[in-house]
Image: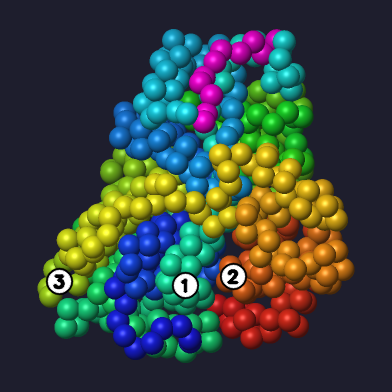
Amino acid sequence: MGGLAGEPVDLLVVGGGINGAGIARDAAGRGLKVCLVEKDDLASHTSSWSSKLIHGGLRYLEYYEFRLVREALIEREVLLRAAPHIISPLTFVLPHGPGMRPAWMLRLGLFLYDHLGGRELLPVSTRIDLSSTPEGTPLKSAYKTGFTYSDGWVDDSRLVALNARDAADRGAAILTRTCCKAARRENGHWVAVLEGADGGRREIRARGLVNAAGPWVQTFLDDNIKKTARHRVRLVKGSHIVVPRLFEHDRPYILQNDDKRIVFAIPYYERFTLIGTTDVPFEGDPGEVRISRDEIDYLCRAVNRYFEKQTTPEDIVWSFAGVRPLYDDASGNPSAVTRDYVFDLDTEEDGAPLLSIFGGKITTYRKLAEHALERLTPVLKIGKGPWTAKASLPGGDIADADFGCFLEQTRRSWPWVPAELITRLAHAYGTRIDRVLGEATDMASLGEPVAPGLYEAELDYLVREEWARTAEDVLWRRSKLGLFLDAPSQARVHEWFAVKAPDTTRAAEKT
Ligand SMILES: Cc1cc2nc3c(=O)[nH]c(=O)nc-3n(C[C@H](O)[C@H](O)[C@H](O)COP(=O)(O)OP(=O)(O)OC[C@H]3O[C@@H](n4cnc5c(N)ncnc54)[C@H](O)[C@@H]3O)c2cc1C
């Protein structure tokens, strides 16, 4: 297992989801020597299975989560500016009908939403006449009015990869397919046992340890390092279905279900609609979470109450399920469990700190990382302060965060790249697209077309710069090409890894 010399690192981060990657990035930018270990691929678990919203969380207002909502609302614009290639504004449509929360309550909620967290880029909420606007066309005629409000969309798994990339650019070691099996305190340091994909083990010393293991936060404490957790995690499953698109325009819907929960119907890669999510208490291995038939029926019923076009389980082209690692606040109702995050900082014994993260949202990961570093600063004597609020993520240094303008320029710079491909690459890599396309002057110089719209130049980049080790890493996390490529095309991506990157693939397959 390569990577680090024998010197101790300042911070060992366990977990390559959004929280671990965000903390590694922030710490590396403050000059700390950082090592992040992820037992699978980056974003292989909860951070790939979100609803992909950068949102304040309108419904959390009902639970009086004002701190969380305010922080998340502010973060929307911070993140839109940091990564406009993978994050974009969304205008939600909230149809209103009989039996729902009263209109005055919705107006009050939206007023708070507009004003709690400062807004510059995003438009204000409005009332909308659904009987005469395209947003009303796909809906049943009972829905005549509604509201609109703003939030954002994010490519969640790429957000993780970009945070890891930025951390690495600032000196962090990112070790994927590397499990932290155990850790003990010794002479003022943590000594952690790391196991690579080939089964090889090594020890690493660290001044501080961050447990960002998401759904495994508590088992990491109980089993891997034998510490009694002072907080408990509450695992709540949430599932989504993807169906051929239910409507022509690009605005998502927020739909109140008959159980008072809300379900989103979000445009997904032009051809599809993403529908979710559910809240189901979960026990068992978070690595083995699957959507159930009840959840499928629930989600179909939720959208069928609103749309003329009826959705059946046979329409589903893809589904996914994830486990929320929530802080257990003892709520009876899984929907009511707080979505805020809580830290457990343990500096017992000879002082090497252990910071465990409970809860959190994709939306608040940057602030969570900032707060985590704030907690660690006095213990680890960190000299530098917060820096990420105004920093771009890799590829996100786009003038005025104007992605449309950037896309136009990109098309002009590479006029020989087909429109669909250049749009996908511009979204995925932003200003780093030149590193993907390299010195290429025509399509032939991008190398072999391994699958429709996927060339060797991009695969080489993903292996070199983004830790891609298997076809799944590329098809489902660095991109969502898996949704578009047929089985033979996907098989060719598998073959490419077997032939072109055999060492990395073999090692990854052992995990
Ligand atoms: C259905 C659903 C919808 C959601 N929608 C949204 C949304 O729209 N917007 C939003 O802001 N948030 C949303 N969230 C919340 C958000 O997705 C999570 O809060 C966030 O992804 C959690 O990230 P994490 O880094 O804590 O966990 P994870 O992404 O699960 O990362 C933890 C990582 O730790 C690794 N790991 C564990 N143990 C070890 C070990 N011993 N050694 C090495 N690695 C280890 C795991 O393999 C895993 O990859 C949603 C969540 C769900 C489930």
Q: Is residue 434 left or right of residue 411?
A: left
The residue type indicated by label 2 comes to: Glu
For image coordinates 41% across by 61% down, the residue present is: 25
Front position among marks 3 and 2: 2
Badges 3 and 2: C-beta atoms under 8 Å apart? no
Q: Image check: 207 left or right of 431?
A: left
- Which residue, given by chain and number where applicable, does mark 3 sit on? 351
Magenta part of the chain = 121-131
**Amino acid at the residue labelled 3:** Gly
Which residue is tagged 1? 174
Residue 40: percent from left, percent from top: 52, 70
Q: Relative to 208, say whether 71 is above or below.
A: above
Depth-wise, is mark 1 or mark 2 nearer the camera?
A: 2
> Residue 412 placed where, x, y %?
78, 48
Tell me the element at label 3.
Answer: loop
Q: Which dot, 1 or 3, sits closer to the camera?
A: 1
Q: CA distance from mark 3 to mark 2?
A: 36 Å
What residue is rendered at 45% in x and 14% in y? Answer: 107
Q: Determine the residue positioned at 67% across, 13% down.
A: 130
Residue 8 in the image: state x and y as whole percent.
30, 81
- The residue tagged 2 is 465
* Residue plotted at (42% across, 25% down): 113
Q: CA distance from mark 1 to mark 2?
A: 11 Å
Which quarter of the figure is the C terminus placed in?
Answer: bottom right
Q: Secondary structure at mark 1?
A: strand
